């Protein structure tokens, strides 16, 4: 930096200005002579950048800028106030000291410039400087932020050789780095080898385990800490451990921590919120509400946690009451309440609340709008979904992979597959969820070959499929009757991608084999299911029993029905399906006998609710499906079947609901289009009159 010799004099603090005694009047300013001590004192008292720049100008003018102590004060102030300006000063320093490198590394790490921090670390070593205990913590933080495992191990080794790890502060920074990197074994090893541990060491270890989803290990470390350590848990320890208890549903340990807080530590707002969240997610809503009411000070996070707790358990009225009482409602609280209405199929209330949110001047983010798009998909509300799509464009909101996935699903469930494809191809950044959504959309709409083609393109692009992707792929194979293709993809799940098949995957393959008449192979597949939980086995045998009905395989049907009744005798679907098998095989006597067995009280209790909530009730459980089959006139009852691997999938549960409605309506329009044993896909019901006609028909058909 070049400074003019005629730079204006500074207005320095009075106690730092030397006094000049003269008997003559002074007509021109007298240059202020600064000593090294005066320079340092001036820099210490400096509070703002313009003043600092004036001081710096005088330092250059009088040659103090090369003094090491002055340089240190200059760099310390500059890095704290203006990093870009500090870099300009740093570039003019001929021989930076370790102190200057340290303050520069620290400033870059705090600003998130992790790569530049590592560059400076390498540079100081090239200059022959040796990092100290002040250097390493910030370097380890930069490595953790960049997720550079090899680089972290290398610098760890360098610190070990230099003896820096005898400092507890440096060791804690190594622990924190491995926690960020997810290197759990290295994290534990460093902790065990530490010569001295303080409270921060225990906290960093527990936090690192929680970040790596090693919740049981985190709880184990907490217990070990309370038994072995000479330090007592503090707020950070308690809050992190409670988060692990929440995931593990470890209510007993959570209560012990609550007791410790009450008797020794004392409540804070942060601890209260952690306890509230733990009790709520463990199902103890009343205790959670008691903690909430007892909190003297509440922030918006506390209100959001309590509202979210009520929402998660379907207590929407209580959630809304608390929502209205909240003195401050931020975007997250609004989104939580809106998402709760969507989650429990109250989309109209969600849209109304969204309008109130806009009136309040709260601008929605993509997560709010994605929740509303999910609701539109549930109802097949195309017009509202298009309005939300337009809102993104009108307000300049980017349509990324998350939003694109929601739009694709919404348009697909409303029967607008071309719009789904258009959105898919418009997005440059495609993640697994986006590919999965379009594959499932194509499979749902009967475009099996296109779905499988896109799956191949997904693999070619290097995108790794997940378990939901394979639900769409296997569903496409099932719709198209591609037995060999389905077997190949099912096998590749475990062999290539190491994905353990779930109920949805077994169900799709059994459905595929059942449609092809390969009933023995389907039965063998069920026997190979590793988890023999009834919740998995019963739906799979139910699907096979449906296939037995379609192919009139009475012997296998009787055997499977008996197995189902042995597992769960109260399940009426077995009786109904077996009755259908007998009917198809023209064994009327046995048919009537078993049909009577399916007339259970639960069917009578649910008849009205099934009509009033047509979209959700007719296809949501096997019992309701049986009700429809037993009450509607033949052959209309054959259009209603229960496919658990579709209906209970997290990705396409609502898709199946809409499909069930579409199938019913399409049959009313054109009964000849229906092919027994197939799942058809048609556009959603868009007009109120169409819905009313369908409901009227069903009320008449199911009249007592």
Image (cartoon, grey):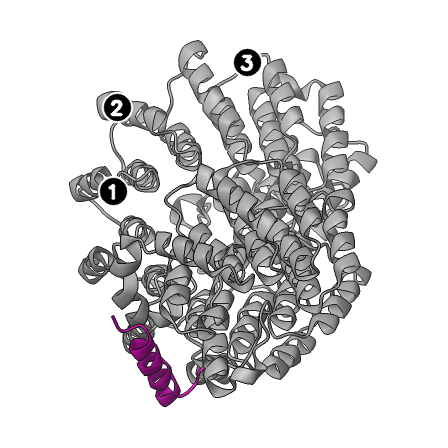
Residue 155, quarter of the rendered image:
top right
**Is residue 16 rendered magenta in the image?**
no
- Mark 3 packing: few (<14 Cα in 10 Å), some, or many (20+)? few
**Is residue 695 rendered magenta in the image?**
yes
Q: Residue at x 77, y 49 (%)?
A: 492
Per the image, label 2 sits on a secondary structure element best described as helix
**In front: label 2 or label 1:** 1
Compared with residue 410, is residue 38 higher up or lower down, i.e. above or below?
A: above
Q: Measure the C-alpha gap from mark 3 to mark 1.
A: 42 Å
Residue 331, quarter of the rendered image:
bottom left
Of the two numbered discs 2 and 1 on the same chain, state the one appearing first in sequence.
2
Q: Find residue 42 and report its horizontal and vertical position in percent.
A: 49, 46
Q: Find residue 298 and report its horizontal and vertical position in percent.
A: 23, 48
Q: Residue at x 49, y 81 (%)?
A: 667
Of the two numbered discs 3 and 1 on the same chain, state the one appearing first in sequence.
3
Residue 528 left/right relative to 27: right
Of the two numbered discs 2 and 3 on the same chain, state the one appearing first in sequence.
3
Write down the residue under mark 3.
196
Write down the residue under mark 1.
285
Span colored in magenta: 685-704
Tell me the quadrant of the picture where the N terminus can be found.
Answer: bottom right
Badge count: 3
- Mark 2 packing: few (<14 Cα in 10 Å), some, or many (20+)? few
Tell me the quadrant of the picture where the C terminus can be found.
Answer: bottom left
Q: Which mark is residue 259?
A: 2
Q: Which mark is residue 561?
A: none
Residue 642 left/right relative to 58: left
């Amino acid at each position: 930096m070049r400074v003019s010799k005629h730079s204006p004099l500074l207005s320095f603090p009075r106690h730092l200005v030397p006094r000049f005694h003269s008997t003559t009047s002074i007509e021109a300013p007298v240059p202020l002579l600064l000593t090294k001590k005066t320079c340092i004192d001036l820099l210490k008292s400096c509070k703002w950048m313009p003043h600092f720049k004036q001081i710096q100008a005088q330092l250059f003018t009088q040659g103090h800028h090369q003094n090491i102590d002055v340089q240190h004060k200059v760099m310390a102030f500059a890095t704290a106030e203006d990093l870009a300006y500090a870099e300009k000063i740093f570039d003019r320093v001929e021989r930076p000291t370790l102190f200057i490198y340290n303050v520069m590394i620290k400033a870059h790490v705090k600003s998130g410039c992790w790569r530049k921090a590592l560059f400076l670390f390498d540079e100081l070593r090239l200059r022959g400087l040796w990092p100290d205990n002040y250097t390493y913590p910030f370097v380890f933080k930069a490595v953790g932020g960049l997720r550079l495992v090899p680089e972290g191990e290398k610098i760890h080794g360098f610190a070990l050789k230099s003896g820096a790890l005898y400092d507890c502060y440096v060791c804690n920074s190594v622990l924190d780095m491995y926690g960020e990197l997810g290197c759990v074994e290295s994290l534990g090893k460093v902790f065990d080898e530490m010569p001295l541990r303080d409270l921060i060491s225990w906290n960093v270890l527990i936090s690192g385990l929680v970040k790596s989803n090693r919740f049981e290990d985190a709880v184990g470390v907490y217990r070990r800490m309370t038994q072995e350590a000479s330090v007592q848990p503090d707020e950070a320890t308690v809050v992190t451990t409670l988060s692990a208890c929440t995931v593990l549903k470890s209510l007993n340990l959570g209560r012990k921590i609550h007791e410790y807080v009450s008797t020794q530590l004392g409540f804070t707002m942060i601890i209260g919120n952690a306890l509230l969240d733990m009790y709520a997610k463990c199902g103890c809503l009343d205790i959670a509400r008691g903690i909430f009411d007892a909190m003297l000070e509440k922030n918006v996070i506390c209100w959001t946690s309590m509202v979210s707790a009520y929402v998660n358990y379907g207590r929407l009225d209580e959630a809304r009451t608390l929502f209205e009482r909240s003195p401050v409602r931020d975007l997250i609280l609004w989104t939580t309440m809106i998402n709760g209405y969507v989650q429990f199929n109250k989309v109209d209330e969600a849209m109304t609340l969204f309008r109130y949110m806009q009136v309040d001047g709260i601008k929605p983010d993509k997560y709010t709008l994605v929740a509303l798009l999910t609701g539109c998909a549930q109802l097949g509300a195309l017009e509202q979904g298009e309005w939300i799509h337009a809102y993104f464009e009108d307000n300049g909101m980017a349509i990324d992979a998350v939003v694109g996935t929601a739009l694709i699903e919404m348009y697909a469930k409303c029967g607008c597959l071309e719009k789904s494809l258009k959105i898919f191809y418009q997005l440059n950044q495609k993640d697994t969820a986006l590919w999965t959504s379009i594959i499932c959309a194509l499979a749902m709409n009967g475009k099996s070959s296109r779905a499988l083609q896109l799956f191949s393109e997904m693999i070619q692009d290097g995108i790794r499929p997940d378990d939901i992707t394979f639900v769409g792929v296997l569903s496409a194979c099932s719709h198209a009757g591609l037995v060999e293709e389905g077997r190949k993809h099912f096998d590749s799940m475990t062999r290539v991608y190491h994905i353990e098949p779930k109920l949805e995957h077994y169900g799709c393959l059994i459905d595929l084999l059942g449609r092809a008449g390969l009933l023995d192979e389907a039965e063998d597949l069920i026997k190979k299911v590793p988890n023999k939980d009834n919740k998995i086995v019963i739906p799979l045998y139910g699907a096979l029993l449906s296939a037995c009905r379609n192919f009139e395989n009475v012997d296998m049907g009787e055997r499977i029905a008996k197995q189902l009744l042995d597992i769960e005798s109260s399940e009426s679907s077995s009786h109904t399906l077996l009755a259908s098998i007998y009917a198809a095989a023209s064994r009327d006597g046995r048919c009537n006998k078993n049909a009577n067995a399916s007339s259970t009280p639960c069917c009578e209790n649910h008849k009205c609710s099934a009509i009033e909530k047509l979209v959700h009730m007719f296809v949501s459980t096997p019992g309701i499906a049986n009700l429809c089959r037993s009450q509607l006139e033949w052959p209309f009852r054959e259009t209603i079947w229960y496919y658990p691997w579709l209906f209970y999938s997290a990705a396409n549960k609502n898709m199946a609901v809409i499909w069930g409605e579409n199938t019913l309506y399409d049959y009313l329009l054109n009964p000849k289009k229906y092919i027994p044993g197939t799942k058809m896909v048609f556009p959603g019901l868009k007009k109120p009159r169409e819905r009313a006609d369908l409901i009227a028909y069903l009320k008449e058909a199911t009249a007592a």
